[in-house]
């Protein structure tokens, strides 16, 4: 699966993407600060994402005492994709 290079964007909170042929794929890391840092650096070493591509670390609302960061990538929709996997 190929992701587009514009991995992080301001429309990540907007479920109505202006480009219907693209789909946002959100990757979350929920952990302690040390856990997030270690994972982000490991993914960088594997050339998965640049360190600066990840959003600022924030408190994780549904996980007391933990933090969260997010990476948004975009994929081109394929014919036959469903909008919901439920």
Image (spheres, rainbow, N blue to C red):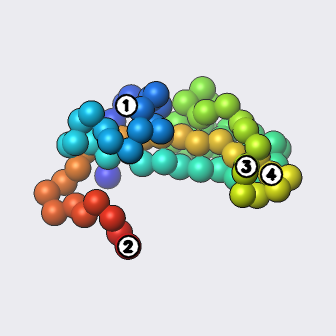
Identify the mark nearer the N-term, 4 or 3. 3
Mark number, residue 66:
4
| Residue at the disc numbered 1 | 5
Between 83 and 54, which is closer to the camera in this rendering? 83
Q: What element carries label 3?
A: loop
Point out the frontmost of discs 4 and 1: 4
Q: Which residue is drawn at 76% across and 43% down?
A: 59
Determine the residue located farthest toward the left in the rendered image: 79
Identify the mark nearer the N-term, 2 or 1. 1
Mark number, residue 60:
3
Q: Vertically, is 63 above or below 46?
A: below
Q: In this view, does 36 lie to the left or right of 20?
A: right
Determine the residue located farthest toward the right in the rendered image: 65
Q: Is mark 2 on a helix, strand or loop?
A: loop
The location of residue 55, given as percent across then percent down, is 61, 33
The location of residue 7, given as percent across then percent down, is 43, 33
Point out the frontmost of discs 1 and 3: 3
Please tell me how crowded label 3 is: few (under 14), some (14-19), or many (20+) other residues with Cα within 10 Å.
Answer: some
The location of residue 56, given as percent across then percent down, is 67, 31
State the separation of the CA atoms marked 4 and 3: 6 Å
Mark number, residue 86:
2
Q: Is mark 1 on a helix, strand or loop?
A: loop
Q: What element carries label 4?
A: loop
Q: Residue at x 72, y 57 (%)?
A: 62
């Amino acid at each position: 699966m190929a992701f587009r290079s514009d991995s992080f964007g301001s429309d990540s909170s907007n479920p109505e993407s202006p480009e219907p042929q693209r789909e946002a794929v959100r990757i979350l890391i929920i952990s302690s600060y040390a856990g997030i840092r270690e994972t982000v650096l490991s993914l960088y070493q594997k050339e998965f994402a640049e360190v600066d591509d990840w959003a600022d670390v924030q408190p994780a609302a549904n996980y007391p005492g933990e933090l969260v960061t997010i990476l948004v990538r975009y994929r081109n929709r394929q014919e036959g994709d469903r909008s919901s996997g439920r």
